[in-house]
Image (cartoon, coloured by chain):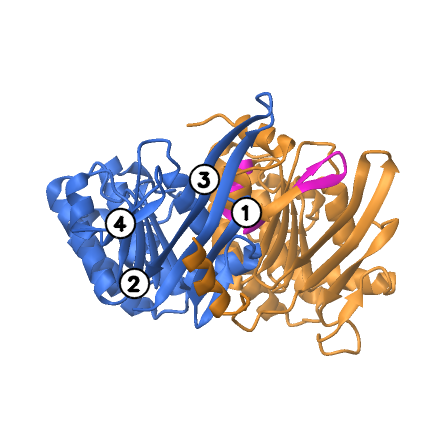
Amino acid sequence: METMLRASEVSKRFVLHNQGGVELPVLTQASFSVNQGECLVLNGRSGSGKSTLLRALYGNYLVDSGRIEVQADGYWLDIASATPRAILQLRRNTIGWVSQFLRAIPRVSALDVVMQPLLDVGGDAKQAKRKAQQLLERLNVPSHLWALAPATFSGGEQQRVNIARGFVLDYPVLLLDEPTASLDSTNASAVVELIDQAKQRGAAVVGIFHDSQVREQVADRLYDLSTQDATVQG
Amino acid sequence: MTAMNSVISKSGPVQQKIHGQADRPLLVVDALSKLYAPGKGFSEVSFDLYPGEVLGIVGESGSGKSTLLQALSGRLKPDAGSVLYRGTVKGDQGDQMNDLYGMPESERRRLLRTEWGVVHQHPMDGLRPRVSAGGNIGERLMAKGLSHYGSIREQALRWLSDVEIDQGRVDDMPTTFSGGMQQRLQIARNLVTHPQLIFMDEPTGGLDVSVQARLLDLLRRLVNELNLSVIIVTHDLAVARLLADRLMVMKQSRVVESGLTDQVLDDPQHPYTQLLVSSVLQN
């Protein structure tokens, strides 16, 4: 299968200018690649830089050196040096992001939150709505909530709205930041199913999963941030 | 690691490609400066703004951000540098870049009345107090050459409801409106001519928090639907996060950091940006 994403010698440290200029090294020469249809799980103890690395893959964090290249429409783009405009374009069409936290916008309904990524790429409103409804159903978000703004939802409901939003568009690359954290087993397995489907259609997936059972279900390879080795799973 | 490198070199140089048709900037700002005194005003500001893009300018008061906005919008002549605008300036088809301060002042004023809009922090700075709400909206249409009263009134009514003002208030003076309503009226007045570029100076600044959320949501929706390019000055980082695609952080007349909005706010690099971000109360 074709490589979709590759990180080469990515290093990053945080410099806390207002706390005595303390330097915290987080990533040292991290390198890996992810193919289509494959799920790479970032592994390592708390504080080993998993989350920082995942955020760097999305262009949310800068890196000090190294390259993060992603294939978009037959071109390779280096996220580590791309312009904000190019990164926004990538996020619209190529890289999806699912975290456990929803940044709710006042007065926007759950259904609209989920549909938006499809509308942003010029999708048909009717089809977008149908797909959003299907996802909300699969993730067991009660239909009487769909027309309401998620700001008042429970944490778990907000999280599932966010997951539906992340899977509404068939992104070639998916970044998952503990999507199953604090979900019950029914909903966690619905998410695992969505990840499996994404892999089957050829998505390259990178994720962080603390739940070892979920991790074993979805991971093809592990990338260990402590030793920085990619190992084949199972 | 070496195996990895060889894979990369095989594929040749990294290519950057931006898709879509909106791939030429609307505004090109180069080394723009205006200093009243050292550290007062703005110095060496450069950026490109593309169609549909929202640029936030953040920083504390006195950092020069409002002065910069005035110069960008043709209302304050800079000491040095240039602002190029791609629009329908007299005689061309909107295909070439025109130097904002190289054109006659009448042309800059025409831009401000038609293709551009300015949303002031204090709504009454951008509204006429002795003209009805409908008249305030219709005036910009008349500046664009419309003269049919019925059609102007019809558009004014539609815009009133678009900004969530009861159509029954069309003949009332804006001075009888609440602050939030005045601000929404000012926005309608600006948007009625379908401008390409809007300049906003602290548009939610003088409003109560409950009114702010509604206005922000309205702005976000209008910016998306009309594919507006916006330059917005704000000291409120939450407003910046909600509306802006990218940010410039100003301190003492200089841009100290710029980048993608969430990157600047989540991984600030400059000491001043770190201070700004860490000073916000978490909720």
Q: Name the foreground residue: A171 vs B154.
A: A171
Q: Nearer the viewer, mark 3 or mark 2?
A: 3
* Label placed on residue A27: 3
Labels 4 and 3 touching (C-beta < 8 A): no
Residue flagged by tag 4: what amino acid is it?
Thr
Q: Which residue is mark 1?
A: A65
Q: Chain of mark 3?
A: A
Q: Which of the marked residues, 2 or 1, is nearer the chain's N terminus?
A: 1
Q: Is residue A134 left or right of residue B256?
A: left
* Label placed on residue A203: 2
Q: Is residue B75 visible?
A: no
Range of magenta residues: B237-256
Residue at 68 percent of width and 48 percent of height:
B127
Chain A takes which shade in the image? blue
Q: Name the foreground residue: B280 vs A65.
A: A65
Q: Which residue is mark 4?
A: A231
Say whether mark 2 and mark 4 are on the same chain: yes
